[in-house]
Image: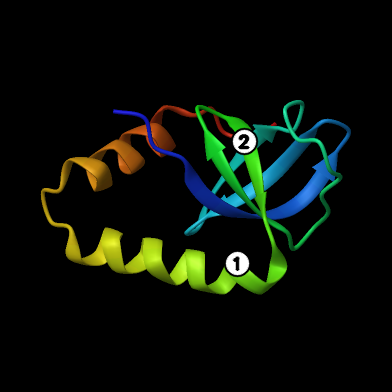
Amino acid sequence: MCLGVPGRIIEVRGNIAVTDFWGARRDVALDNLTEPVQSGDTIISHAGVAVRRIPPHEADAVMAMYEVVLCEAGEDPIALDVIEELELEPEPV
């Protein structure tokens, strides 16, 4: 199963964004995005690559939805995929 995970950009270094995923910071490649991003923007990441920038007016709702899913999912396979993806991504340099 493939799942994109939302995160908030902390810092942009060239084509890499240090992104916060519920307290876990990971480097995310920005090569696939067609619009520029900056600190504070919310993106969807899959396998360490940003696949979409979330419009600012939707960002809080998207993050809240994922938080509900993650908090209430228990043994939900989607939640386990999110956790596994975050654990497998390398720490930022």
Quarter of the image holding residue 32?
A: top right
Which quarter of the rendering shows the C terminus? top right
Is residue 43 rendered to the left or right of residue 90? Answer: right
Decide: few, some or many residues near mark 2? Use Cα within 10 Å; few <14, some 14-19, many ≥20: many
Vertical order, 38 against 71 (above or below): above
- Label whose residue precedes the other's in the sequence (2 or 1): 2
Quarter of the image holding residue 55?
A: bottom right
Q: Position of residue 13 (x, y in %)?
A: 85, 38
Q: Position of residue 16 (x, y in %)?
A: 77, 33
Give the spatial CA distance, label 2 vs label 1: 15 Å
Is residue 33 rendered to the left or right of residue 83? Answer: right
Decide: few, some or many residues near mark 1? Use Cα within 10 Å; few <14, some 14-19, many ≥20: some
Quarter of the image holding residue 10?
A: bottom right
The structure residue drawn at horizontal position 84% and vertical position 43%, both measured from the top left corner, is: 35
Q: Amino acid at mark 2?
A: Val
Q: How is the image coloured?
A: rainbow
Marking on residue 72: none
Q: Amino acid at mark 1?
A: Ala
Quick one: SS at disc 2?
strand
Is residue 26 rendered to the left or right of residue 65? Answer: right
The structure residue drawn at horizontal position 39% and vertical position 67%, both measured from the top left corner, is: 65
Vertical order, 63 against 36 (above or below): below
Q: Position of residue 28 (x, y in %)?
A: 65, 35
Marking on residue 59: 1
Q: Which residue is mark 2?
A: 51
Count of residue discs: 2
The structure residue drawn at horizontal position 73% and vertical position 59%, both measured from the top left corner, is: 41
Vertical order, 82 against 59 (above or below): above
The structure residue drawn at horizontal position 25% and vertical position 65%, both measured from the top left corner, is: 71
Is residue 18 rendered to the left or right of residue 90? Answer: right
